[in-house]
Image: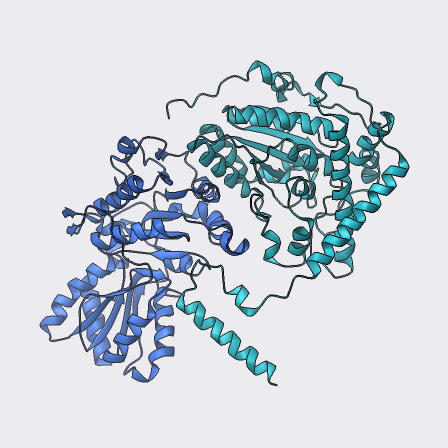
Amino acid sequence: MAVMTLLQAVTSALDCKLADDPNVLVFGEDVGVEGGVFRATEGLQKKYGEKRVFDTPLAESSIVGAAVGMALAGLRPVAEIQFDGFVHPAFNQIVSHLSRYRYRTRGTRPMPVVVRFPNGGGVRALELHSDSLEAVYGHIPGLKVVMPSTPYDAKGLLISAIEDDDPVIFMEPKRIYRAIKQEVPEGIYRIPIGKARALTEGNDLTLVSYGALIRVCQQALVEAKKDGIAVELIDLRTIYPMDSQTIVESVKKTGRLMVVHEAPESFGVAAEIIARVSREAFYHLEAPPVRLCGNDTVPPLPKSEDIYFFPPERVYFEIKRALES
Amino acid sequence: MSDRKVPPPSGANNLFAEFDPLKGKRLEILDQNGTLTNPAWAPPLSDEQVLAAYKMMLLARVADLKAVSLQRQGRLYTLPPSIGQEACAVGSALALDRDDWMVPAYRELGAWLVRGVPLARVYLYFAGSEFGNVYPPGVRVMPNSVPISSQLLHAAGIGHAITYQSRKEVVLTYFGDGGTSEGDFHEALNWAAVFRCPVVFFCNNNQYAISYPRAQQTRAKTIAQKAIAYGIPGIQVDGNDLLAVYRATREAVDYVRAGNGPVLIEGETYRMGAHTTSDDPSKYRESAEEAEWKPRDPLLRIKRYLIAKNLWDDARDEKAREEAQAQAEEAFREAEKWPANSPDEILTHVFAQQPPEMARQAESLKRYLAWKEGR
């Protein structure tokens, strides 16, 4: 075991799979010599050579499009897009080909591709460096969408993603890239895609979140606990396919549901969770489910960032309100 | 990368030097009367090979006309006719070896047939089934790609994988004149050139992107000259001349297989039919223009060449047409026999394993269908 940040856990996962499988290639803008703008691929080109870990021309559509071609020829490409907002030029390749090739060819040409990128806001960044489009990707048939919240999960989920025979959009919460350190095994282990995890047990409220917001929720729960509020915090970990069962079981116990994410509220992941819970556990609900999400606005530049990206205190406030209803 | 510099074309590829796009020359070997006007560049094809190529073009023509007719009868759905582009399709595809790859757009019927895509599958696709995209094992032809030029990046990626694994295959990919305005055209040529991927980019310049004419698509004088910006060879050929298309593609295939990086070929041809069966070209082009291209029909030219060489005559041509017709009919019968899809079919192959939510959706659909059945 070694103590790792989420970023180092990502590097370790890539390292393990590069060593394990010659069909794995890692590439993107500045991932080679520089080791990535966040250093997620630090040292990998030196270790595995420039055929396995390489810089690409500055063109996101070609990063994903070439990955599709590599998968057609039998490789397992792991493509990095530098920032969440830079995936947009590759959107056509993701939606028109990556997600559809298996279906289009009746299972004969699968797409074992990972597209990973730093996701979300809260780091005082430039425009289009703070987006969180998991609901958009989750809406596209054929894509798996993963967002870890801890170093341990990040490594285990990324290894599963690379080994998966379907395309995985792997969203790394950049806000907590270096915020948390955790014991992480140095070798290969797997966290299954499509499984949520309850982080705390409680009977008063089911609180569902994922990615960087898990930490915000955990901080809020410190204060809530002092008030004697017992919250069951569930880390979704995979956006699609969603583990609604774990959430439904919890809501059957608590009778109350609150979903927290930083992406805009309307048509978001929270809406999907609430729809499923309403279907499966309607008569167990003691109050209308609550969502605490980003507003339906553009993630703002740093001067307004603290207004858009809510602090633990806001989560605490909404928990109190939810329990009063 | 240590060796990104593109080497100058070797002596064996002086075709590319001779027909450098900046010289404004176009490779033509047979004129429209079927006369060999440029024997110096005639490809080393035997008479039997040329005859076989012609028969393949004929099959593509007959099968295409049949497809359009079937569409008019409501037995196939919307499809893009390939009439007029048989020399580009067949001539280029014939330059590939058995293990090579093809990444088509969607108007490459002759190329599919050369590469072993069963005609029945082509019909099945346009009869509305994804099973029309499933080809026999070993047929390295990718399915139709609808978003324009997006497939060129897949060709670059396949080429990248081939280079990474030190294999010797090449990739031949197709697009149209309109496709050269897409960003992915630029990105794919750039990627393939930077990483020296073994890809031949073949532009079917059929003069139209639906209604938008080639002259308006780009200020560039030729499409071939776009190669210069990527530091790769480019060549313009008479796309209705089977021998010219084959010669250029053959040279390009050899050049890219030798590890020199990609080549751009522009085949100048004419879309004799509509963009798709839903389109009416009389809205945007004069019939005089269509009449002007008619004598340049790629089949006519190679047929005249074969007749002049005493390898062919009208009687044999008529017989070959009938055989092609029978073959197309048999293929359509096979496609028509394909069973209707079960409800399960649309909910499988989205993922390797069906997620629980989709299983629930399948149950819901079946519940309704069972109710409907009992009504």
Which colouring convention does the figure follow? by chain
Residue A145 falls in which quadrant of the image?
Answer: bottom left
Q: Position of residue B302 (x, y in %)?
A: 80, 31
Q: Position of residue A294 (x, y in %)?
A: 31, 62
**Which residue is at the front of the view, B85 or B62?**
B62
Report the side of A294 relative to B139 (left or right): left
Q: Is residue B31 visible?
A: yes
Report the side of B310 relative to A257 (left or right): right
Q: Is residue A122 visible?
A: no
Please report the residue visible at 34 percent of the width from the left and 52 percent of the height from the top.
A161
Q: Quadrant of the C terminus of chain A?
A: bottom left
Q: Position of residue B72 (x, y in %)?
A: 77, 58
Furthest residue to the left? A226
Please report the residue visible at 41 percent of the width from the left and 52 percent of the height from the top.
A167
Query: Does A307 sit above or below residue A60?
Result: below
Report the side of A97 relative to B114 (left or right): left
Hue of chain B? cyan
**Which residue is at the front of the view, B260 or A212?**
B260
Furthest residue to the right? B315
Count of marks, rendered view: 0
Please report the residue visible at 68 percent of the width from the left and 44 percent of the height from the top.
B109
Please report the residue visible at 76 percent of the width from the left and 18 percent of the height from the top.
B38
Report the side of A269 relative to B278 (left or right): left
Query: Does B333 sit above or below residue B6?
Result: below
Q: Position of residue A169 (x, y in %)?
A: 37, 52
Q: The chain drawn blue is chain what? A: A
